[in-house]
Amino acid sequence: MPAGTARDTGDAPDLVTVPARQGLEAVDILRRGATPAVGPVLHDGSCDTLGFLVPPGTAAGWDMPGSACTQTNGRGARIPAEPPVTGSGWLLPPEATDPVTDPAVLRKALREAARMIEAADRCR
């Protein structure tokens, strides 16, 4: 694991939450890229939202409409094997992914996903 990741420094990752439809599209975009780069992804129990683990400090500058980035403030300072939120589950578990998702790469994927969803909705 690369040095300086949330797993080895003890710093808690931040969490970007998005509507499930956009999040699933973004996961697909991130996984099929030239260099697949997606960290652990949570889904809520009702599958309404997805949560991407991102590096600590991301929340301070996150400004993407339609999403939220929350500081975990040290809750679950290490990425646990079990989902850290009651009623949630791992869509992509920590052991099967990069340590966290790069926020710049995630922003780009979320924008592309939003454009794809908008185009698909216009075709209905």
Image (cartoon, helix red, strand yellow):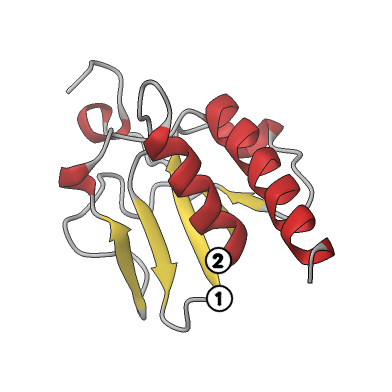
Which residue ends up furthest to the top in the rendered image? 3
Q: Nearer the viewer, residue 7 or 122?
A: 122
- Dot 1 crowding, Cα within 10 Å, few <14, some 14–19, many 20+: few
Q: Residue at x 35, y 34 (%)?
A: 11
Along the viewing direction, whichever of 105 and 78 lies nearer the viewer:
105
Percent across and percent down for residue 124 are: 79, 72
Residue type at mark 2 is Ala
Question: In the displayed image of the protein, which residue is found farthest to the front?
Answer: 123
Is residue 56 shown left or right of residue 85? right
Report if the CB atoms under discs 1 and 2 are less than 8 Å apart. yes
Total tally of numbered discs in the picture:
2
User: In the figure, 3 relative to 17: above or below?
Assistant: above
Q: Is residue 84 left or right of residue 44?
A: left
Depicted 44 relative to depicted 119: above or below: below
Mark on residue 89? none
The residue labelled by disc 2 is: 20
Which comes before the other along the chain, label 1 or label 2? 2
Residue 82 position by quadrant: bottom left
- Residue drawn at point x = 58 percent, y = 64 percent: 21
Query: Looking at the picture, how far across and down is residue 1, in whole percent?
Result: 17, 23
Look at mark 1 in the image and give the residue it sits on. 48
